[in-house]
Image (cartoon, grey):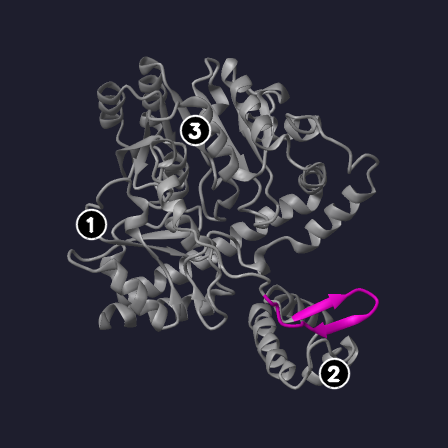
Amino acid sequence: MNERSSVANLAESLRRELQCYSDGQILPPSRVLVDRYHVSPVTLSRAISVLAAEGLVVSRPGAGVFRARPHRVPYAAGDFSWQQVALSSEAAARSVDASGVLATLTVPPADVIDLNGGYLHPSLQPERALAAALARAGRRPGTWSRPPVEGLADLRTWFAADISGAGGSLGAADVLITAGGQSALSTALRSLAPPGAPVLVESPTYPGVLGIAHAAGLRPVPVPVDAEGVRTDLLADAFQSTGARVFVCQPLFQNPTGAVLSPRRRGEVLAVARAAGGFVVEDDFARNLVHADSPPLPLPLAADDPDGVVVHVRSLTKATSPSLRVGALTAHGPAFERLRALQAVDSFFVPRPLQETALELVAAPAWRSHLRLIAGELRDRRRAVTTELQRLAPDLLTEPAPLGGYHLWLRLPDGTDETALVAAALRAGVAVTPGSAYFPAEAPAPHLRLSYAGASNTAQLTEGVDHLLRAFGAR
């Protein structure tokens, strides 16, 4: 039984036991509960945390765990109807559709196989290396003092070298430490495009970009993607017809298609943007998620960009833990000052303990070992999923599976109701993502995005594919 299931099962058992306790009564000591339920102290601690988050128990250090007293609302619920008018006024009418983002952030119930999430399963996260890095960071003098607004110098230097190489065009002065990739994308789009402006995005694209654009009052304009990446002929047309000055792309293992921008189109993207007087925001989210059987990766677009066309986004989060929200924005020239100023206004700086922990992690030998480990694991997971799909439903795999990232993009038969299929899959015990959330405009065809990062192992992935295909047949 995996850890997530053990915690969920224990939490349910403790909920039933709590019914026998009066309000405010203390629960048995931890050692008694560990023996009674035959679990580890860690599992017990996590289950207690679940109950505390639900408001069922209160943990008092040094005293014990108590059944919580019922919460009594001191006054009647307010009348929020006035907010409909306030939020619909011209100045506040921007709607934010976060459904695509929330779908991948929602943790499925313990009995549902996760083929939806965007983060590594806990068994693939470097928990020991992170714990050791956190402990070392905690012993550093000044860890809790205020960091520079741009980020720690050593961490900026590491990111610069990791992105462009030791002899590349980036230095520490071109790097701004951010609170993960999503925050970096938000800072980039809001810094480079004024409210109401068009912003060019790949179609399909990462839903988080669409959410950021809408929240900032920007107008996403789709540019189609094929097996070689973004269609550069259509990109040039889009720059010209809309007057846009920003194009957001994922040249490596694009989400959701998995496409890698071809060598010919790499140069064309930069040339088109330069001719239009525009920026390319390069979201390099999957570089640390390359598979063990992948050929050498192309360098980032930012690696050779002396004219400052590219604003590069890199994050440590995807390859480590959802809670290590440390990333980097890189830019040349006045654009960097614009990025720096907006981030300072928004959040001042990234907490220093997180930066120190990230620096300790990437400087340790365990970092490279971890990347090699997940490269092999992701390869094995991709093979398990594609083998099962090829055996049972080969028509769903219209393109070769990408050798990086953590997802497949499945083309469904015309006329398929994505919403009904996703609901049927959930009833069958598997969570998947509908493709419509990835399109800035109407989707040209039905799709599913299938993630293989969040499941516990390859056996569970195979089981999940079987559940999905049964739901597909019974839709």
Which secondary structure, mark 2? helix
The three-letter amino acid code for the residue at tag 1 is Ala
Q: Examine the structure image and report whether residue 294 is included in the region drawn in magenta.
A: no
Q: Position of residue 52 (x, y in %)?
A: 65, 66
Q: Which residues fall within the magenta stretch?
A: 57-72
The three-letter amino acid code for the residue at tag 3 is Leu
* CA gap, disc 3 and disc 1: 28 Å
The nearer-to-camera label among 3 and 2 is 3
In the image: residue 433, left or right of residue 157 = left
Q: Give the camera-side residue of 118 and 165.
A: 118
Which secondary structure, mark 1? loop
What residue did someone put label 2 on? Answer: 35
In the image: residue 146, left or right of residue 169 = right
Q: Is residue 169 visible?
A: no
* CA gap, disc 2 and disc 1: 55 Å
* CA gap, disc 3 and disc 2: 54 Å
- Disc 1 residue crowd, few under 14, some 14–19, many 20+, Cα 10 Å: some
Badge 2 or badge 1: first in the primary sequence: 2
What residue did someone put label 1 on? Answer: 445
Q: Examine the structure image and report whether residue 61 is included in the region drawn in magenta.
A: yes
Q: Decide: is 193 above or below 6.
A: above
